[in-house]
Image (spheres, rainbow, N blue to C red):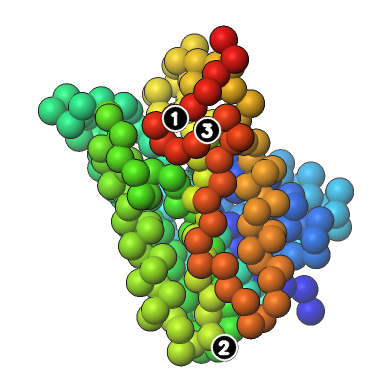
């Protein structure tokens, strides 16, 4: 039987690229995000290209009731989730803490921390019961570094780092692997969302740099997933060659 992977935030960027790569590698997929038309288009693309089964589930991960209904109503054939990729997330705004927008803070905290927890709370018990599973959390280099104006986003990714470590301990006896993949700069919709749709500012982030592409992180996720049963990659950090860490980027300008 094909393995089932649930990927949150599959409508764009890293989640979308991972969906395509896992489909190519024989997985059946539960794909989530809020933009249902993008999920439906991706389902069609995957079915045509890879003949893989796809279940699109549109819901807002910030809303516990929506998460509940999506997971509790899963048909029996989709309940044996082998892989959970906690990818949905965002940065909103870049400003000093004294100038920050509370709505942005709440969206980041509710999505990156609480949303990740809501999904995990519902999927991890099914894995624990079967004594099998693999959870991959998408953290960030901002999960161990703090840069000016990044305050709350960095805090949410520090939380993902802590939760990844905690989940690995708590699920140890259940034979559920927990890994964290922590990217640096990846060109996706990330910067457009961070700058509230300002395309010019978003483009500038990648000026003079060859950034990572979503497919690079998808390949990393596939590597983490395909280690032998006795091997777990706890944590993996990936940056563009032109980025050393959150502070140092060299640009060809
Ligand atoms: P994108 O903006 O391209 O994708 C984000 C995805 O998250 C979308 O599919 C979006 O779907 C989903 N999402 C956001 N909010 C919600 C919500 N409330 N409910 C459900 N789904 C939601 O960005 P990336 O692919 O770059 O981001 C993926 C992850 O990678 C994030 O956790 C991000 O923090 C992390 N990351 C990104 C880096 C980068 O430089 N790009 C670097 C390090 C980490 P929809 O809008 O349809 O709901
Ligand atoms: C995204 C990378 O450096 O913008 O998590 O925080 S960074």
Q: Residue 59: in sight, yes or no?
A: no
Q: Residues within 10 Å of mark 3 (few under 14, many from 20)?
A: some
Q: Kindly state the secondary structure of the residue where label 3 is placed.
A: loop
Residue at image mark 3: 243
Which residue was labeled with disc 2? 130
Coordinates of residue 113 in the picture (x, y in percent):
34, 55
Measured in 3D between alpha carbons, the distance from the residue under mark 1 to the one under mark 3, in whole angstroms, is 6 Å
Residue 235 vs 79, above or below: the answer is above
Please state which of residues 176 and 9 is positioned toward the viewer in this rendering.
Answer: 176
Q: How would you rate the neighbour count of disc 2 (Cα within 10 Å): few for under 14, some for 14-19, many for 20 or more?
A: some
**Disc 2 versus disc 3: nearer the observer:** 3
Residue occupying the point 67% across, 44% down: 216
Q: Is residue 135 left or right of residue 2?
A: left
Name the residue: 49% across, 21% down.
205
**Mark 1 touches mark 3? (CB < 8 Å):** yes
Q: Position of residue 197 (x, y in %)?
A: 45, 21
Q: Which numbered disc flags the more N-terminal residue, 2 or 1?
A: 2
Task: Please name the residue that numbered disc 1 is placed on.
Answer: 248
- Dot placed on the residue nearer the N-terminal end, 2 or 3: 2
Q: Are marks 2 and 3 in contact (CB under 8 Å)?
A: no
In the picture, the disc for residue 133 is none
Local secondary structure at mark 1: loop
């Amino acid at each position: 039987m094909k393995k089932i992977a649930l990927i949150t935030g599959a409508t764009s960027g890293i989640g979308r690229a991972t969906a395509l790569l896992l489909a190519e590698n024989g997985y059946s997929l539960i794909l989530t995000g809020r933009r249902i038309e993008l999920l439906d288009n991706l389902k069609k693309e995957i079915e045509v290209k890879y003949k893989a089964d796809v279940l699109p589930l549109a819901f807002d991960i910030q809303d516990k009731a929506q998460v509940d209904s999506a997971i509790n109503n899963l048909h029996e054939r989709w309940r044996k989730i082998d892989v959970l990729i906690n990818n949905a997330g965002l940065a909103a705004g870049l400003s000093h803490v004294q100038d920050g927008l509370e709505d942005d803070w709440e969206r980041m905290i509710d999505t990156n921390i609480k949303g990740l927890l809501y999904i995990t709370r519902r999927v991890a018990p099914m894995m624990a019961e079967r004594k099998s599973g693999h959870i991959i959390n998408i953290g960030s280099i901002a999960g161990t570094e703090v840069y000016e104006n990044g305050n709350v986003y960095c805090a949410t990714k520090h939380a993902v780092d802590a939760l990844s470590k905690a989940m690995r301990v708590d699920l140890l006896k259940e034979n559920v692997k927990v890994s964290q993949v922590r990217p640096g700069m990846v060109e996706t919709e990330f910067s457009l969302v961070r700058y509230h749709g300002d395309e010019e500012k978003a483009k500038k982030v990648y000026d003079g740099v060859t950034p990572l592409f979503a497919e690079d992180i998808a390949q990393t996720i596939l590597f983490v997933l395909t280690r032998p049963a006795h091997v777990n990659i706890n944590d993996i950090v990936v940056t563009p060659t032109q980025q050393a860490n959150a502070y140092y980027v060299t640009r060809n300008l």
